[in-house]
């Protein structure tokens, strides 16, 4: 860094936009999380002022930022995602001497209620409705998303060459661009492999067509067809459904964690929902021990 730029930074003259740009290049560029972070950066610049000095972000302005997000009706998890972007940037600034200290960022409390997931009946009804309306491509994408548990942004970055065949495990997909930047490999079910083959027949990036706007458009149709007004009935339930089914079918948690790309076991445990069948299995296990 040029000497004068360093002096300006140490005096708090580096702008919010400059800091966000530096943080983006260091941590998020060319990752699956790139587009999400660009969106967060745009909103942060709009609220705090792109040309304002970094020290404008203090405890008071953060409270105002959270309040503005709440008034827009955003979920706690969405607000926390934007706070995480700010937190990462401020840590970057402090570590490099751009600021002497950073304000404490208090995340929104996220409900610990059990996550919703699709039942097999709901899945069948959903896929039938999509195919009856000629939305075959999106139906394949739903099946792919349920059976792989991949985030939409991860799927969009998958090229034809990402799938390979293993003599023991069958077809696998190697993910290079993931949300947390840790590559992972996922075995493909028969219908996931069929969906990939079907959509990649004409597209090198078979899932790139399923942009956020495309998903919203198709999901509006699904909600109407299912007559489901529950605000938690969203496309991301495909991922919740994958994790829930793995846990419910007694796949070891460390395997589920790696499959889903979770950083911590706490994230995986959210899907460990107890059902009457779980309690029955527990009772049988105890009786066998007697």
Image (cartoon, rainbow, N blue to C red):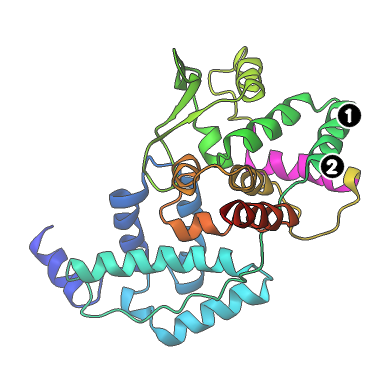
Disc 1 on helix, strand or loop? loop
Front one among 106 and 40: 106
Q: Which residue is painted at 77% across and 60% down in the image?
A: 231
Horizontal side, residue 104 vs residue 163: left or right: left
Label annotation for residue 83 = none
Q: Which residue is mark 2?
A: 221
Let me know if residue 223 is in the magenta part. Answer: yes
User: Which quadrant of the rendered structure holds the C terminus?
Assistant: bottom right
User: Which quadrant of the rendered structure holds the N terminus?
Assistant: bottom left
Q: Which residue is painted at 45% across and 45% down in the image?
A: 261
Q: Which residue is painted at 18% across and 66% down in the image?
A: 96
Residue 23: which quarter of the image?
bottom left
Q: Which residue is mark 1?
A: 133
Disc 2 on helix, strand or loop? helix
Image: magenta residue range = 210-224
Percent x, y of residue 225: 90, 43
Task: Quote the CA–CA distance across marks 1 and 2.
Answer: 9 Å
Percent x, y of residue 116: 71, 56
| Callouts 1 and 2 close, C-beta under 8 Å | yes
Let me know if residue 275 is in the magenta part. Answer: no
Residue 126: which quarter of the image?
top right
Crowdedness near tag 1: few (<14), some (14–19) or many (≥20) residues, C-alpha within 10 Å: few
């Amino acid at each position: 860094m040029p000497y004068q730029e360093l002096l300006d930074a140490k005096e708090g003259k580096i702008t919010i936009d400059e800091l966000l740009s530096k943080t983006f290049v260091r941590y998020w560029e060319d990752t699956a999380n790139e587009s999400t972070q660009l969106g967060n950066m745009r909103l942060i610049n709009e609220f705090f002022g792109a040309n304002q000095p970094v020290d404008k972000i203090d405890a008071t302005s953060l409270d105002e930022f959270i309040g503005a997000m709440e008034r827009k009706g955003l979920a706690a998890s969405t607000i926390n995602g934007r706070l995480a972007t700010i937190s990462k940037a401020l840590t970057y600034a402090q570590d490099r001497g751009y600021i002497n200290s950073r304000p404490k960022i208090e995340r929104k409390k996220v409900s610990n209620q059990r996550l919703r997931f699709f039942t097999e009946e709901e899945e069948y009804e959903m896929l039938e409705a999509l195919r009856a309306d000629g939305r075959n491509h999106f139906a394949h994408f739903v099946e792919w998303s349920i059976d792989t548990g991949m985030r939409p942004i991860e799927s969009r970055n998958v090229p034809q060459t990402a799938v390979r065949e293993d003599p023991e495990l069958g077809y696998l997909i190697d993910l290079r661009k993931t949300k947390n930047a840790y590559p992972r490999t996922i075995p493909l079910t028969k219908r996931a492999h069929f969906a990939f083959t079907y959509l990649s027949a004409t597209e090198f990036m078979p899932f790139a067509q399923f942009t956020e706007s495309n998903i919203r458009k198709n999901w509006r149709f699904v909600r109407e067809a299912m007559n489901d007004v529950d605000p938690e009935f969203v496309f991301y339930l495909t991922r919740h459904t994958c994790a829930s089914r793995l846990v419910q079918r007694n796949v070891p948690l460390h395997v589920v964690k790696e499959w889903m790309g979770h950083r911590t076991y706490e994230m995986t445990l959210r899907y460990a929902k107890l059902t009457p069948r779980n309690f029955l299995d527990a009772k049988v296990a105890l009786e066998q021990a007697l």
